[in-house]
Amino acid sequence: MTDILAALFVLAGSFFMLVASLGVFRMPDLLTRMHATTKSGVLGAGLIMCGVMLFFIDSSVTLKALAVMAFTTLTSPIAAHAIGRAGYFIGVPLWHKTIKDELHGRYDEETHVLHSSAAQKEAQEENSSQN
C-alpha cells in the first residue's frame, strides 16, 4: 500500500514539474515565467520528496528529503525574486497586456536605489514645502 501511495506522490510531483516546464514555454514574459516555475517547481519537488520518504522508510532518507523540501521552499522564491528584479532593472520588457507597473519611476538608475512609495511621498512633500 505504501508503494502505491509513494508512486502517486511521485506521479503528482512529476505532473507539477511538467506544468512548471510548460510555464516556461507558454508564459509571455520573464515575471510570469518565474512565477509559474517557482510555484509549480517547489510543489512538484516537495511531492516527489514525499514519495521518496514513503518508499524508503528510513530516518536518514526522511531527514534528507525534508532538508531538500525546506531548502527548495526557502530558496526558490528568493532566487526567482532576485532574477525577476534584475531582469526588470536591466530592461527586460513586460508583457504588453500588463496592467500596472508598480516599480515604474521608483528606481534611480544612477544610484541603483529602489524607493518605496512612502519614501517617494516624503520626498515629494519635502520638495513642495521647500518651494
Image: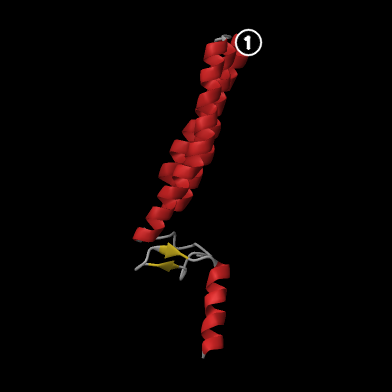
Q: Depth check: 131 or 64 in front?
A: 131
Identify the element where label 1 is drawn. helix
Identify whether 71 is placed above or below 85: above
Q: Picture coordinates of residue 43 (x, y %)? A: 55, 33
Res. 107 image quadrant: bottom left
Q: Residues within 10 Å of mark 1 (few under 14, many from 20)?
A: few
Image colouring: secondary structure
Q: Picture coordinates of residue 31 (x, y %)? A: 46, 52
Identify whether 98 is placed above or below 21: below
Q: Depth check: 89 or 13 in front?
A: 89
**Residue at position x 50%, y 31% in the image:** 71
**Residue at position x 56%, y 75% in the image:** 122
Q: Picture coordinates of residue 19 (x, y %)? A: 50, 36
**Residue at position x 54%, y 30% in the image:** 70
Q: Picture coordinates of residue 73 (x, y %)? A: 54, 35
Identify whether 47 is placed above or below 34: above
The extreme right residue here reads: 1
Q: In this view of the protein, can residue 38 be seen by the observer?
A: yes
**Residue at position x 57%, y 81% in the image:** 125
Q: Amino acid at mark 1?
A: Thr
The extreme front residue here reads: 130
Identify whether 54 is placed above or below 81: above
Q: In this view of the protein, can residue 28 be seen by the observer?
A: no
Numbered disc total = 1
Name the image quarter holding the N terminus.
top right
Name the residue beneath numbered marker 1. 2
Left or right: 105 in relation to 91: right
